[in-house]
C-alpha cells in the first residue's frame, strides 16, 4: 500500500522525505536517490543498490548473452 504525504521545499532547494515514505521504501541515511523531471512533474526513486539482483526479473532475451548486446539491440531499434 502506498501513501501521500505533504512536505515543503526549503530555501536551499532541500526536500525532506517524510518518515512514512522512508519507512515504506526502507530508505536509510546516505541512500542515493534518482530524480526524473519534466516541466511540471518529477518522479523520485531510490537508486537500486545492487542492480545485478534485478537481472533476469523480466525473463531472458533470445540470442542475447551480454548486457551490452541488449543495449545495442534496443538503442538501434526504431519505434
Image (cartoon, rainbow, N blue to C red):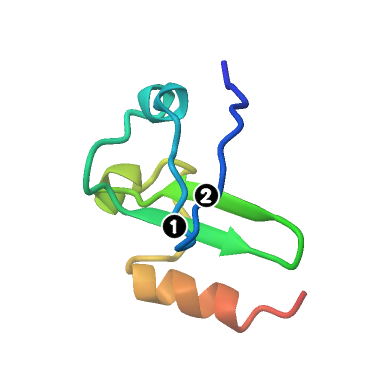
Crowd band around label 1 with a 10 angstrom C-alpha radius: few (<14), some (14–19), many (20+)? few
Q: In the rendered image, which quarter is residue 78 located in?
A: bottom right
Give yes or no for contact between labels 1 and 2 (Cβ–Cβ under 8 Å): yes
Q: Nearer the viewer, residue 66 or 10?
A: 10
Q: Which residue is mark 1?
A: 34
**Left or right: 3 in relation to 28:** right
Which residue appears farthest toward the front when viewing the image? 11
Q: Quadrant of the N terminus?
A: top right
Q: Which residue is mark 2?
A: 44
How far apart are the two marked residues, 1 and 2, measured between alpha carbons? 6 Å
x, y (%) of residue 65? 34, 66
Q: Residue placed at 41% from the left, 65% from the top?
A: 64
**Left or right: 45 in relation to 75:** left
Say which element carries label 2: strand
Q: Nearer the viewer, residue 70 or 35?
A: 35
Above-or-below relation of 35 to 27:
below
Which residue appears farthest toward the bottom when viewing the image? 76
Amino acid at each position: 500500500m502506498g501513501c501521500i504525504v505533504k512536505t515543503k521545499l526549503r530555501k536551499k532547494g532541500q526536500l525532506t522525505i517524510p518518515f512514512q515514505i522512508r519507512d515504506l521504501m526502507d530508505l536509510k541515511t546516505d541512500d542515493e536517490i534518482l530524480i526524473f523531471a519534466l516541466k511540471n512533474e518529477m518522479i523520485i526513486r531510490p537508486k537500486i543498490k545492487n542492480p545485478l539482483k534485478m537481472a533476469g526479473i523480466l525473463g531472458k532475451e533470445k540470442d542475447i548473452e551480454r548486457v551490452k548486446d541488449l543495449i545495442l539491440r534496443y538503442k538501434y531499434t526504431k519505434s
